[in-house]
Amino acid sequence: MTDEKGDSTSPLATASSDSKPTAQRIPPETPEAISTRFLVIATFWAVIIFLGFPIWWKTTSIYRAHLPIQEMVDWADGKTCRPVFPLEIQVAAPGMQSPESQHLLRTTQHALDDLNEFAAHHLRLKLTNETSTAQQTEDSMEVASNGEEAPDTALTVRVIAQDGLVVPKAELHADTTQLDVFYPPSQVPVPSSSNPPLSVFIAEELQRLYGEEKATVAHILSGEKSGLDSVNPQFAESISRRLRRSMKYADTYHLSFSLFTPGPEPSSWDIEAAVQEYLSPLLHAFAPISNFTVDTQVQLYATFSPMAPPPVYDEVEAAWTLKKEDLSAFVNAAEWPLNPSIGNGPTLNFILYVPAPSQAPMMVKENRASSWIVPQWGGVFLLNPPLSPAGKGSNPAHLSRDYLRPAFMTFSHQLLTLLGTPTTPASLPLRLQTLIRIRAASLLLSASSTMGSLARLTESLPSIPIPATVASSVSITLSHLSSTCSHLRSGRFSAALATARVAETEAERSFFEKSMVGQVYFPDEHKVAVYLPLLGPIGVPLFVGLIKELKRVVAGWKARRRAAA
Amino acid sequence: MAVDRRKVAIFSAAFVLRLVLVCLFPSLPDLLTGRVEVSTPVNSFKRLQEGLFLYTRNVSPYDGGVFHQVGESHAMQLRGFSINSIVQQAPLLLPLFALLPDVKSNPLPSAIFYFIVDLVNAHALANISASGQSVQSRLHSAIRKHIRWDGGSVAAWFLFNPFTIATCLARSTSVFTTTAILFAVSNAVSGNSINAMLALGLASYLSLYPALLFVPVVLLCYDQRAPKLPKIAAFIIQNASILLGSVAGLLGLSYLITGNFWEFMSATYGFHLLVPDLTPNVGLWWYFFIEMFDSFREFFLGVFWLHLASYVGGLTARLHRQPLFVITSLLGVFALFKPYPSISDASLYFAFLPLYRHTFPFMRYTFFAIAAILYASLLGPAFYHLWIYAGSGNANFFYAITLVWSLGLSILLADSIFAVLRDEWEQDHPEARGSEVKQV
């Protein structure tokens, strides 16, 4: 190819050059030959200039959709939105007169504000009508999630008079968002008292309930660096422990339940019914936060890894024991078919291990526990079934739903931990609400910082293309971020999480756009290697011809001027 | 009538030779049809057959979306998993071939049709030779007029060229482009500019690239009719409109046949322009575009096409006194640099070269060029076999051979241009005839 161009232009040169050696015998080139040569060079250059350069310009120009860089950076820097968490708490005092209850509310709010040192997360008390019950709370929650304007009710406090009490007593319902506060009738706050003990009690109780959440939110908002010590040292340990164990947030988690046993039995388990009965309610409760897929498997003759220390028989316990430090080697990752990932999204593995009859019962040596969590991976449960009566020393062939109950109770608990649910309020709905707020905050921050990274990336690499899809993803992200922020401000946390999830998904999509990623690793210097091998050899004769021709024209022009002068 | 009898003998011998080849080796046409050196995606008879099958069953053979596979990985394309439309040939060929009997059950009629097309080509070539344009034109008169071959010899050279025979037996559709080009030129040398333009329109319609021959063909017509036509600009415009009209008419006919204009346009001319199918061939494009980064693909498509087109202006300007030789050289350039060249393009160039028998004495590298071409034609199939079937070679083997082939062709091309220029120069400087020259 390269010599081709040289060859085909060389005859053009021939016309001029082959006259030079014989110049002494024959007259130099005729003007006609010179003009022909000029025409030849001109046609080549005309093609280059009038067709070549437009094509070059058109085909190598990079489409860069406009991105709102400043807005994206502002989000990343936290200038656009300061996330706040105003929690609405309804107070019902069926046994009190209206002025009394309002006074109680006011004083409690004062006490709460005095106790609170983290402004972004604060509790707002609101008096409801007297007949407020748990049922109605449910209703009002539904209304709140349906209606656009009403904030979610985080908690309902019922203040109930009870005889025979000396000091107030609080009782949290484990399955609803209701806190019952019982007080001796003598402690009804009189409107004159500025700091009634009941108000102080309620305020402290609420503060205690939300302490961990507050610390977690502070930790997240402060960028996960210094927040732990500054806000609430007493929760620092538990939060960091929880963060170590829990999975990174994902839109979809895959739950994989596996039954492993070293022998031929049990070969079947009532897994579908067990999941349906023990797990589905929990997954349903998690629906606003994440999606889940469930798959299961049974693996027989699953042996321990040869590296792992085998269980040791403990005479005192009359059981086979595993040492705590050996638990990390329990899962035979090399041979047990545990999928690292199914589709996109992380997989949580839950392993139900039924020991061989010769090694049953099996437990952890130090604390006699039969289950443990593998941080950011899943959980293990050792099921020691009663040996089947038919033949001594054989496991039952089938594990019924009731056998699986303890295992699935444990798995549910492990799932909560792995998903990062806080531990403290005893009520599960409250913990899930807390998780919603925590996730909304972290998604808001992560989508914002992705926007900032994308902005920095496109600024620092002016040669990468920005497809229109990226621009539209960015605008979706930004609009959802701002609606997340406004939802948070008005206390609608479920809605905030929903928009934050969309924002996060779109942000990830725009950042990992394929056609952009490919270009990142194509620096400008490489273009020399792309252009030069072909265009260099083509260009050299063209340029030499052009220069010669220009020289001749300039010389002729000078000669004419001299002649004229 | 002696000449005529000789011509008849040559033509019938060529016909019988082809017939004997087909009858003695019935598998030979199919074998040749499958060879990458002969059949490219744009002229493959096999693809035409598949399209014909669809066409006779009222399914659009151009449906398939060429543009969807532009970014397809080359590994896929090399293994033949292309998902482009089946046919890249012009739509008018479909009803033409629908008239012929089915090839599978009765291959002889279509084979004989191709033989006749070859003979018609040879006849046109003999006419061109008989016109004497190559030695004596309006602005040029060669000095060694006596050293030349007559029409019969030129036709024989064309008919018995193994490349031509292979193309004919492989039933490649570039034969029709060859016919159209030859008719355009043979009409141009007799000054029949309207027929020439209509034929050139057909050639452009079939293969797109012959449109680049417009300028030299018009010059050739103009040379014939110059005394009567003083204004060259008006003549060019007039002929350009005839060419455009004929192409538009053919496209209109195609639209009537296919019913979907853009579909067949993108499947045929889009295919020529964008080169989505990188099946190996004897050209220089496929390997380059396999290796090319995707983001630069469009740019280098532009570069390659411009490179091909840029010769038109330069050669026409330099050799404007011999437009027939401009056509010859451009055909050589096309055989080298077009996106899907096959040996049929080379055979067309080789058919024109003997018209310039009188310049052969000036050529200096004939041995080297012919050796390179023979070497490439013998080793090319061998290396392709090593790569694709034996698996002991790789793509570079075949590409190296196509480089040698291109080298041989380009040396021949440059040498012939040099010879003709030297001839022109001697005409201008009769006193220096026979002196030694040196090419720098």
Image (cartoon, rainbow, N blue to C red):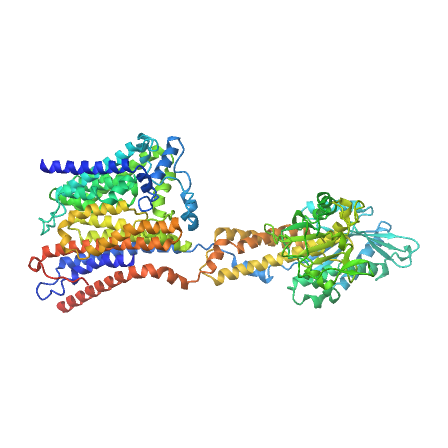
Q: Quadrant of the rendered structure where residue B131 is?
A: top left
**Residue at x 93%, y 55% (from the top left corner):** A164
Q: Residue furthest left?
A: B431
Q: Residue furthest right?
A: A164
Res A318 seen here? yes
A549 horizontally vs A444: left or right:
left
- Taking depth in this image into account, of A59 and B129 the one nearest to the observer is B129
Q: Quadrant of the rendered structure where residue A312 is?
A: bottom right
Q: Quadrant of the rendered structure where residue A450 is?
A: bottom right
**Residue at x 75%, y 51% (from the top left corner):** A407
Number of dots carrying numbers: 0
B98 horizontally vs A319: left or right:
left
B428 horizontally vs A377: left or right:
left
Residue A22 picture location, percent across and down: 11, 64
Residue A340 picture location, percent across and down: 61, 54
- Taking depth in this image into account, of A281 and B93 the one nearest to the observer is B93
Res B188 seen here? no
Residue A137 picture location, percent across and down: 77, 47
Quadrant containing the C terminus of chain A in the rendered view: bottom left
- Taking depth in this image into account, of A326 and A9 the one nearest to the observer is A326
Residue A207 picture location, percent across and down: 77, 60
User: Residue A127, relative to residue A30: is it above or below?
Assistant: above
A131 horizontally vs A72: left or right:
right
